[in-house]
Amino acid sequence: MSVTLVVASSGIGLFARDTAERDLAANSRVFDKIIASREGQMADAGEVVARDFGFREAFATGDAATLVSALQSLRDRARVSEAAIVQLDGSVIASGAGGAIDGAAMLGRLESGQTSGVVSLDGTEALAAAVPIEMPDLAGWLVLVNTLGPDDMTQLSRLSAVAVEAKVVDRSRLAPHLAAVPLGEIVEVDSDDGERLVRVSPIASLQDGREPRLVLAHSLGAALARYTSLRIVLLLISVAGVLGGAWAAIRLSRGIAQPLQSLAEAARAFGGGAVSKVKVEGAVEVRSLAASFNTMVDAVEEREQQVMHASLHDALTGLPNRRFFIEKLDRAVQRQNDNHQSFVAFIDVDDFKAINDAMGHPLGDELLRSVARSLQDRFPDAMVARFGGDEFGLLLSGLEPGADCASLARTLETKLNREMTIDGRGVLVSASVGIAIGPQDADSSDGLLKCADLALYRAKNDGKGAYHFFEPELDAEASRRRRMEIDLRRAIRDGDFELYFQPLFSISQNRVKGFEALMRWPHKEQGMISPATFIPIAEESGLIVQLGEWAMREACRQAAHWPDDISVAVNISPRQLAADGLATCIAQALAQTGLSASRLELEITESVFIGNVEKTLKILHSLQSLGVRVALDDFGTGYSSLSYLRSFPFDKIKIDQSFVRALEEGGSAHAIVRAITTLADALGMETLAEGVETQELLDALQKEGCDMIQGYLISRPVPGAEVAGLLGALQPAEARVAVG
Ligand code: C2E
Ligand code: CA
Ligand code: CA
């Protein structure tokens, strides 16, 4: 009997220690998940900003004020200690309040592709997640940093099932008794606070020269104390057993030893990762021990599930996030074949930025939730996910060969392009959709994502509110675009561009009043590349800002040598107008070349108004106050041309070629051109018709009240060196005398 008791008592001791060890092992798993989930959340938040058009533009143009404000708002929104940009040379642009990080020490890791780990934030250990800023070449990293100081770690510890102390310490600062603990093993350590189980594990560092360690400690005393009552019971049992006789002793030991045995087995299984509960049976104390073991299993399980859920879902819409979507897609791709196809759609809300600006962020959020709901309602069997920002993904797997993908696409289109009621207001929402089908388009999830992305790009370019299926040509087109962008960068560096000039001819004065500067790219292999081809690529990549600055300086430089009554018109892209520094660039170009401001005309298109009308108007007024003229280019090709005429005093309206073409066909074109010139006249604006190729058109335009023309009839665009000769040939004799 005594032997049984001694064995049982020490068995409990061993079991308690065993359980404590399992607890600690289970907790370190929870910790790893929590940390991975935090990093994931930070990376997701960072990714949305790093891909944001406005942010990349601010970065490309070195607009520090916008960058710092974007970083501050990212920091507040993501609730992290600091958000910063690490540039390729290691220098750091920080939001300013969170503390200093050493960007140079991070470079090595970042360049090798590592995206998360521990860094030092003002000497405190902190968790960092980095996302590359791609424009599209790597231009830096956006880094979110959250401290892992004592307070943060206590907060994290609260998420774990048992009382665990956790801290992150650099190896160089570990106490000697902790430094001696083998990595990843659970070891008993005697410290001032009694006996403790300790686990020291390495944790990735995002800076060179540092070796952070996660130290988890669990008091053994506390673990053993939970079983004190059990020991007392055993003692009582022994007394009762001696008194009560062998029969009672055997019965009692059955009620304890066997359930304890199964409890120990369950604990081992649980430690190994299995969900293992025990039957609640045996003596009262053993039953309560079993019950509390089961409660612990439930609690750990639930916490693990919460952590998993948070790391796989989007907080705003409750939808699965990109990571979850990709996991699902991975599985769908493994099973896909010609009889089980995958339908992958990328959905991007059109002009969401403008809607968000106009309606305010809370309503913007509501709109995203509405889109999420309508997708889920209409496609209950699909995986609908939010990728961040205004992008959603939809996956339908296991489609049969006869499945009508086109009709699915049309359903998506009708569901997404309609008036939605947001906070009682009707908002016209439209979205573009890119679709890829597996396995016909690609047999990997990466491939399908890429195809859907290319198709979305095309859908956006085709006009808003449309869907587009992936086609192999899109792939070829994308690589052509990439190659051309690389070429463009080199050509900008080498100064390979030229300006051609096309006369702007006054009908009533019968003379040339100015020239429009048009860019030309003489390419070594491909010959002369048209601006219609390279300007869109330069706009997309932001290179247009540099290119446009060059055109401005060069146009002013050449025009300064022309006669005083000849002006020069320079095209300004919407992106140039949005970037800071356009007014400075123009003022400098004028000052350096001595060209008078009244001889410079800026040509803008109405697309500059999309997004923020107020801001655009402010910029245009500030440009006009420099003394330069502002012309509205391609008039009539947009949606609301007429309304912009009344909001800004343009000096000139350039009627688009399409109207001039239409004049030849008769119909209502005459009436439209007449309406435009009458309105422009009333508003005190000059009118110019573009693309005039024949004398008949000139006559017709003159009759409809047009002031000026531009087109092959007068001259094609010519190199700068030919401007003087062209003027000589075109100007009437008296004008030539006046010039000469
Ligand atoms: P745009 O500003 O509408 O320029 C007028 C275009 O019409 C020019 O094409 C010109 O060569 C062409 N054109 C002129 N007269 C006629 C004609 O009688 N018939 C026909 N069929 N075409 C005529 P280009 O030079 O190919 O330029 C295309 C576009 O590229 C320009 O359209 C402009 O949007 C853009 N672009 C050119 N240079 C620059 C620049 O320096 N900066 C910016 N942002 N865009 C530029
Ligand atoms: Ca133009
Ligand atoms: Ca034009």
Image: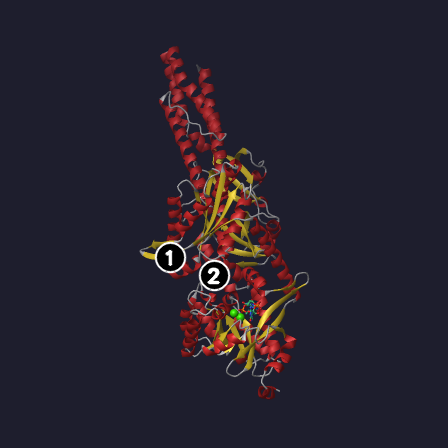
- Dot 2 falls on a residue whose secondary structure is helix
The answer to whether marks 2 and 1 mark residues whose Cβ atoms lie closer than 8 Å is no
Give the spatial CA distance, label 2 vs label 1.
30 Å
Amino acid at circle 1: Leu
Give the number of the mark in front: 2 or 1: 1
Q: Name the one closer to the observer, 528 or 551.
A: 528
Residue 286 visible in rendering: yes
Residue at the far top: name it. 246
Mark 2, residue position: 69
> In what quadrant of the picture does the N terminus appear?
top left
* Label whose residue precedes the other's in the sequence (2 or 1): 2
> In what quadrant of the picture does the C terminus appear?
bottom right
Disc tally is 2
Residue 344 at x, y = what percent? 48, 44
Residue 148 visible in rendering: no
Residue 315 at x, y = what percent? 41, 47
Q: Quadrant of residue 222?
A: top left
Mark 2 Cβ inside 8 Å of ligand 1: no
How many residues crowd around disc 2 within 10 Å: few (fewer than 14), some, or many (20 or more)?
some
Mark 1, residue position: 428
Whether 458 is drawn above or below 185: the answer is: below
- Indicate how the structure is coloured in the image: secondary structure
Q: Quadrant of residue 732?
A: bottom right
Residue at the far right: name it. 524
Residue at 45% over, 30% down: 275
Residue 306 as seen in the image, left or right of residue 453: left
Q: Name the one closer to the observer, 628 or 215.
A: 628
Residue 359 at x, y = what percent? 37, 60
Residue 641 at x, y = what percent? 43, 68
Amino acid at circle 2: Ser
